[in-house]
Image (cartoon, helix red, strand yellow):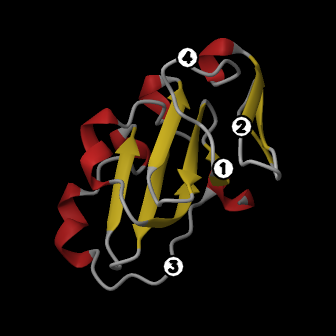
Amino acid sequence: EIQSTENAFAARRGTDGAVIAWGGERDGGVLPTDLELRDVVRIQATSKAFAAIRSDGTVASWGDQDAGGESGYVQEQLINVQYIQASSLAFAALRSNGTVVTWGTPHAGGDSAAVQDQLRDVTAIQASRHGARG
């Protein structure tokens, strides 16, 4: 599997789920040294950041912080993730309990606070624009 941002690529190796990234550093082309990226089952990309689901359902993100590369403020919620979609500057993760976690640029969908109470029993998510290719 290979995904791309505007200026970088990330590939998932099938043998061990390791991630290899290359291209523009700000757009996710360089993996942070403190990021554990093994046993990855799926990668998704905004225009400037990547997110990866590990086999245990946790998520790692990297790249431009404003485009979803920084998920620390929702990291405790990023468990039992089954699927991720991406808009141009934000991610949405569907959890096994049917809830959705979002992060990234608020106007690009990274802030779902206004509808969070409605995001229950969700079975599928889809993004527009950039993320629709996933």
Between residues 128 and 57, which one lies in front from this camera angle? 57
Q: Would you name the residue on which mark 3 appears?
A: 124
Number of marks in the rendered image? 4
3 or 1: tag closer to the N-terminus: 1
* Residue 117, position as x, y percentages in the image: 17, 73
1 or 4: tag closer to the N-terminus: 4
**Pointer 4 and pointer 2: residues touching (CB < 8 Å)?**
no
4 or 3: tag closer to the N-terminus: 4
Q: CA distance from mark 4 to mark 2?
A: 12 Å
Q: CA distance from mark 2 to mark 3?
A: 25 Å
Report helix, strand or loop for mark 4.
loop
**Pointer 3 and pointer 1: residues touching (CB < 8 Å)?**
no
Between residues 122 and 1, which one lies in front from this camera angle? 1
- Where on the picture, by quarter, is residue 23? top right
* Residue 11, position as x, y percentages in the image: 79, 40
Q: Would you name the residue on which mark 4 appears?
A: 33
**Pointer 1 and pointer 4: residues touching (CB < 8 Å)?**
no
